[in-house]
Image: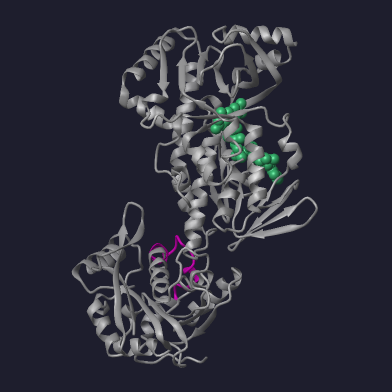
Amino acid sequence: MKAEPLATTVDSAEIAKFSGLAGTWWDPTGPMAPLHALNTARIRYLRDQACAHFGRDARATQPLVGLRVLDVGCGAGLLAEPLTRLGASVTGVDASAEAIAAAQRHAEGGGLVIDYQVGGAAAAEGIFDVVVTMEVVEHVPNLDAFVAEAVAPLKADGLFVAATLNRTPKAFALAIVGAEYLLRWLPRGTHDWQKFVRPSELARALRTLDLHVRDVSGATFDAATATFALSRDVDVNYLLSASR
Amino acid sequence: MVGQTLALALAGAGVEVTVLERAAPEAALAPTFDGRASAIAYASARLLAGIGAWEALAPHAQPILDIRVSDGESLLFLHYDHRELAAGQPFGHLIENRHIRFSLFAAMARAGVRVRAPVEVRGITTDEFGATVTFADGTTVRTRLLVGADGARSFVRAQAGIRSRGWEYPQAGIVLTVAHELDHEGIAHERFLPSGPFAILPLPGRRSSLVWTERRDMAAQITALDDERFAEELRDRFGDFLGDVQPSGPRWSYPLAFHRAETYVAQRTALAGDAAHTLHPLAGQGLNLGLRDAAALAEVIVDARRLGLDFGAADQLARYEKWRRLDAVALIAVTDGLNRLFSNDVAPIRLGRDVGLGLVNLLPPLKRVFVGHARGTSGKLPRLLLGEAL
Ligand SMILES: Cc1cc2nc3c(=O)[nH]c(=O)nc-3n(C[C@H](O)[C@H](O)[C@H](O)COP(=O)(O)OP(=O)(O)OC[C@H]3O[C@@H](n4cnc5c(N)ncnc54)[C@H](O)[C@@H]3O)c2cc1C
């Protein structure tokens, strides 16, 4: 499978931003700590949505066995590795060559087999059961083009799952002022509020591709335990799943 | 015992686990290997039931129906009656360690837990992705997470470079089983004698297990006495409230120490049980605390695994560490404080503690806190201790 980054779906300044952090991606106490904290809620959501969609038992040791998953914007594999352990065969793509190198090194060290590629979403059509793209759509220049490209490789009965940040005043206060400036949780400039995506915008982009939203859930930060939990509050971090 | 409990909990949830043990099973199950009996708190019994080890233990378990704490010859004493508890359940059960060891071994065999015993762990190296253990014969095993449940002088702890702080008590614990004429009625006695606590713990039948603390030099002299003179020393302290008392079986003497590891986790490594902390035995909480470690660690591992997360990674180990640390610190402070308060004969302190014990008795809310700890139900409990599945 060959994949080339497209000018409309990839912002090179954004990619450079993440490439600089690739070496620390797997350090749960490093600059990517918030992503590690968020990861538990993201995987739980993805696992449960996929189990509901494909009729699997979420408490099984490998509930996703036999499913082909495409992770668009996989970074250093924070999502791709757990999905592999849950039984899925995962293809991870990312526009940052540094991130992919870090992902490959880490998977090898942990004895996991994951197909990593530098680039955008795959060119081949209709081969994946699940396409996921998490914490990516708020960094792309053209949402519609990005979503169309991401959904193309999805099978007719496949599941699409995205996680991103909502464009609300609360998200500005928490994700930018709070996380980047006050807590210094994220490097300044990690996020650009204007690029945050409302659930309705994502839903519209999916509808033109004949995908319908199945569920929208929030991931809410609990300061006392420094963890995210799934919730109904979609004002800041949220996850969305869609199928045909 | 803690390591085997953890292995059983994990195997039950489908996690691949191998137990490495220095002692050969025959040796560890011999009646002379471990003379102690353990007070198994109510929550710990639920854990043992959950991992399939309780059924075989039940016939050997003596329910504790009442705990009487007294101060030498003083009349004031702290009195816990199990009928004060909501469901009228016992505080816990007393079980001889040999029975606990045996039933854990049997449960491991039934569950198909891989056991390598006897083996001597000689070397440990860790990296970002796992730990490699080297045995005395030069063979190795590789794992994502190494748990050191290897007791107070933990090799795993030393290899991980985790420092342990603490001190030796100037006391030793003489441990033996006694037979007595009258029924103990399920009552446990903790007496604070000038030399240290003297605990009479009811066993099934007309037998009790004693933990008798003495200054170390005294303990050595007492345990070396011939049978007749040893029995005399015993009766002096035990009294005649259960009729005639006879030592039965061998005597052991355990030096008492307190220590706590500075951290319970390191790269690809977690400590549990006595490897992480030892307590003064006066509260009978050492094993219970270790079983709570096992239940919490099993829960962290299984929760991570259900999400495909790497359970040996630093963020998962940090969850375990954070969860367990408070419990250990609180118990160490309480038991050490009690021992210091009671192991002396200074008049003002004596008066103070007499009044203190009497007061605790009069104040129901304070007593409930004490009772909660005695039963092992204080704090946020792991699912296994609540009697739930992992
Ligand atoms: C006198 C006395 C009375 C007590 N009474 C009570 C009580 O009533 N209630 C209670 O809850 N607690 C009590 N305790 C405390 C309790 O006994 C301990 O907390 C408990 O035994 C700890 O269990 P563990 O599995 O952590 O360690 P251990 O029981 O010490 O087990 C460690 C295991 O690791 C193995 N090992 C060690 N090094 C290696 C190596 N290099 N390679 C391979 N294997 C190795 C050992 O063979 C052993 O089997 C008492 C303690 C004392 C001293």
Residue B74 appears anywhere in the view: yes
At 38% from the left and 90% from the top, the residue drawn is A149
The one of B354 and A11 positioned closer to us in this rendering: B354
- Look at the image and give the residue range highlighted in magenta: A20-39
**Image position, residue B212 (x, y; %):** 60, 18
Residue B278 appears anywhere in the view: no
The one of B93 and A236 positioned closer to us in this rendering: B93
Image quarter for ligand 1 equals top right
The quarter holding residue B88 reads: top left
**Image position, residue B104 (x, y; %):** 63, 42
Say if the magenta span includes residue A37.
yes
At 51% from the left and 27% from the top, the residue drawn is B63
Relative placement, left or right, of A143 versus A15 is: left
User: In this rendering, is residue B3 above or below A130?
Assistant: above
At 65% from the left and 21% from the top, the residue drawn is B176
At 56% from the left and 72% from the top, the residue drawn is A107
Say if the magenta span includes residue A229.
no
Relative placement, left or right, of A175 versus B166 is: left
The one of B166 and B77 positioned closer to us in this rendering: B77
Relative placement, left or right, of A8 versus B159 is: left
**Image position, residue B12 (x, y; %):** 56, 53
On-image quarter of the C terminus of chain A: bottom left
